[in-house]
Image (cartoon, rainbow, N blue to C red):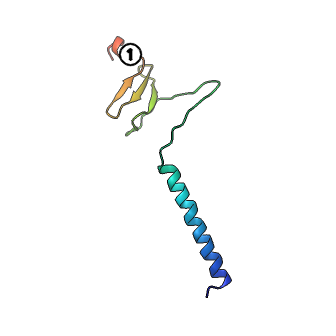
């Protein structure tokens, strides 16, 4: 038979497991988000060694918006093609 202290620890452990399970499910499930803003979004240059596909940055060297396609940075504006960069 469990003592009151043991019963409380068991219930707390079960609660913790449920919280962790809910957290894991929330971060592993597919979500589709939308960003709406009144104002500005500031995008800075990214020097990440391993950017995630879909990352957006502003390249301060070429003054251009770029996206990472999984292999290399791609200009959003075509500015690199015009300027030959």
Task: Name the image quarter holding residue 76.
Answer: top left
- Residue plotted at (50% across, 29% down): 44
In percent of width and height, residue 2 lies at 62, 85
Of 74 and 16, nearer the camera is 16
Q: Where in the figure is residue 64, as x and y percent of width and height?
A: 44, 20
Question: Residue at image x 62%, y 76%?
Answer: 9
Q: Quadrant of residue 13?
A: bottom right
Which quadrant would the C terminus be assigned to in this image?
top left
Q: Nearer the viewer, residue 39 or 8?
A: 8
Residue count near mark 1 (Cα–Cα under 10 Å), binned few <14, some 14–19, many ≥20: few
Q: Residue at x 62, y 81 (%)?
A: 6
**Up/down of 39 relative to 70, above or below:** above
| Left or right: where 58 falls relative to 18 | left
Q: Is residue 48 left or right of residue 31?
A: left
Q: Secondary structure at mark 1?
A: loop
- Residue ID for mark 1: 78
């Amino acid at each position: 038979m469990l003592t009151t202290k043991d019963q409380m620890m068991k219930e707390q452990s079960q609660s913790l497991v449920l919280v962790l399970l809910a957290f894991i499910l929330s971060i592993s499930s597919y979500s589709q988000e939308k960003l709406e803003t009144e104002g500005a979004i500031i995008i800075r240059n990214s020097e990440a060694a391993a950017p995630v596909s879909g990352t957006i940055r502003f390249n301060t060297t070429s003054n251009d918006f770029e996206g990472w396609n999984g292999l290399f940075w791609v200009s959003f504006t075509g500015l690199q093609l015009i300027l030959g960069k």
